[in-house]
């Protein structure tokens, strides 16, 4: 979505703009922009003005890119979407500062709406994002976490920003605020599905992600949750491995079985998400040929088709 201008977020007189003018942001800007697409579709469904939605789409993507920049520092990731990660191009300290700068710019642009509740909800979202990362950092054994803890992590780390993307347009067209709870739950659950699918993709060698990075870093991962649950006796061995390539054939079979289990559990969330989508459609009196609703369903399929 080129109209979001995601590669131009520096203030005109910023020191960073001059120092980083040659920095490639392709690892951040060449994503699918799912969060902003969600936001725009939500706005279209409630008939909010497009001119009011585009800046919100830019804001949600800036926040997302800030978290990706911080994530790549924490995870020591060298690539992002097939391109060098920001920490790989500059260094960790500057990457943290750049992520902070993006968050500051996002909040600055949001203040132009003069809607305290909208800003309050984004700051709450930022709090949730930090808590999600904190949970991941504190839990260094991904094979011994519960499904409940994983869901808490996914809701905070990923679901929170999806939730904001889905409810933010309601503050532009406030007559639909009565649907807030449904929109909130849909966005949050969709975010959890996205996190689950992202974890599964971590074990797909053909993806643009660094293959097996969560395994290598002992990060909480939806697949590793099932691997630890089914084979707790192997968790100590897995924790001591430096690379996923060290798995023997039997252990690789166990991993494949865990991927199947993760996909099955993800379908439970997916079915609830689809139920909510049709409840929202009914509440808004959207017809069968509603373009934004049909595109929303397509987007939901896109997220899940990544792993099925």
Image (cartoon, rainbow, N blue to C red):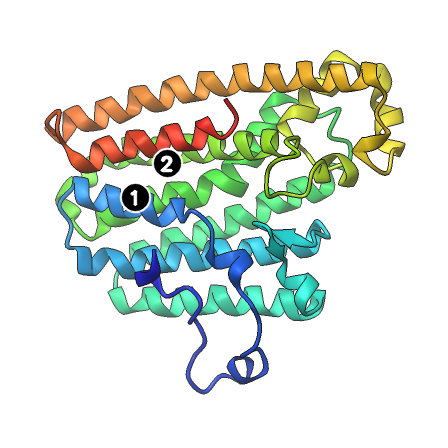
Question: What kind of element bears circle 1?
Answer: helix
Left or right: 117 with respect to 193? left
Which of 18/143 is in front?
18
**Residue closest to the far bottom:** 13
Q: Residue at x 54, y 19 (%)?
A: 263
Which of 253/49 is in front?
253
Q: Which mark is residue 18?
A: none
Left or right: 92 with respect to 181? right
Q: Is residue 197 above or below residue 59?
A: above
The residue where tag 1 is placed is 167
The residue where tag 2 is placed is 187
Q: Residue at x 65, y 46 (%)?
A: 134
Which of 194/305 is in front?
305
Please state the horizontal and vertical placement of residue 236, each as a whole percent of the image. Answer: 88, 25
Please state the horizontal and vertical placement of residue 91, each as a whole percent of the image. Answer: 71, 68
Please state the horizontal and vertical placement of residue 278, each as a whole percent of the image. Answer: 23, 22
Residue 66 seen: no
Residue 124 seen: yes
Q: Is residue 167 above or below residue 280?
A: below
Give the mark nearer the N terminus: 2 vs 1: 1
Q: Residue at x 29, y 29 (%)?
A: 297
Q: Is residue 237 above or below residue 53?
A: above
Circle 2 crowding by C-alpha within 10 Å: few under 14, some 14–19, many from 20: many
**Residue closest to the far front:** 206
Question: What kind of element bears circle 2?
Answer: helix
- State if disc 1 and disc 2 touch (CB < 8 Å): yes
Question: Which quadrant would the N terminus be assigned to in this image?
Answer: bottom left
């Amino acid at each position: 979505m080129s109209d979001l201008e995601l590669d131009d977020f520096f203030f005109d007189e910023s020191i960073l703009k001059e120092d980083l003018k040659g920095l490639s942001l392709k690892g951040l800007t060449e994503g699918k922009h799912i969060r902003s697409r969600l936001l725009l579709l939500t706005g279209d469904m409630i008939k909010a003005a497009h001119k009011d939605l585009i800046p919100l789409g830019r804001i949600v993507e800036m926040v997302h890119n800030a978290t990706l920049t911080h994530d790549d520092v924490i995870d020591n990731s060298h690539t992002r979407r097939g391109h060098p990660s920001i920490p790989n191009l500059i260094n960790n300290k500057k990457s943290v500062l750049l992520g902070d700068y993006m968050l500051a710019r996002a909040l600055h642009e949001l203040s132009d709406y003069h809607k305290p509740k909208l800003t309050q909800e984004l700051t709450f979202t930022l709090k949730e994002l930090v808590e999600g990362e904190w949970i991941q950092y504190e839990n260094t054994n991904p094979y011994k976490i519960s499904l409940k803890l994983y869901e808490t992590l996914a809701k905070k780390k990923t679901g929170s920003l999806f939730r904001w993307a889905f409810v933010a347009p309601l503050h532009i067209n406030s007559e639909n605020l009565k649907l807030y709870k449904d929109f909130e739950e849909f966005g949050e659950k969709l975010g959890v599905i996205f996190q689950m699918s992202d974890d599964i993709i971590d074990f797909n060698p053909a993806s643009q992600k660094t293959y097996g990075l969560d395994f290598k870093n002992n990060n909480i991962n939806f697949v590793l949750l099932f691997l630890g649950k089914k084979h707790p006796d192997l968790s100590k061995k897995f924790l001591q491995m430096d690379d996923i390539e060290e798995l023997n054939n039997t252990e690789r079979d166990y991993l494949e079985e865990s991927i199947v289990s993760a996909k099955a559990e993800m379908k439970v969330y997916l079915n609830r998400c689809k139920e909510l989508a049709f409840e929202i459609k009914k509440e808004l009196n959207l017809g069968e040929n509603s373009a934004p609703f049909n595109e929303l369903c397509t987007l939901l399929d896109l997220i899940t088709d990544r792993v099925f």
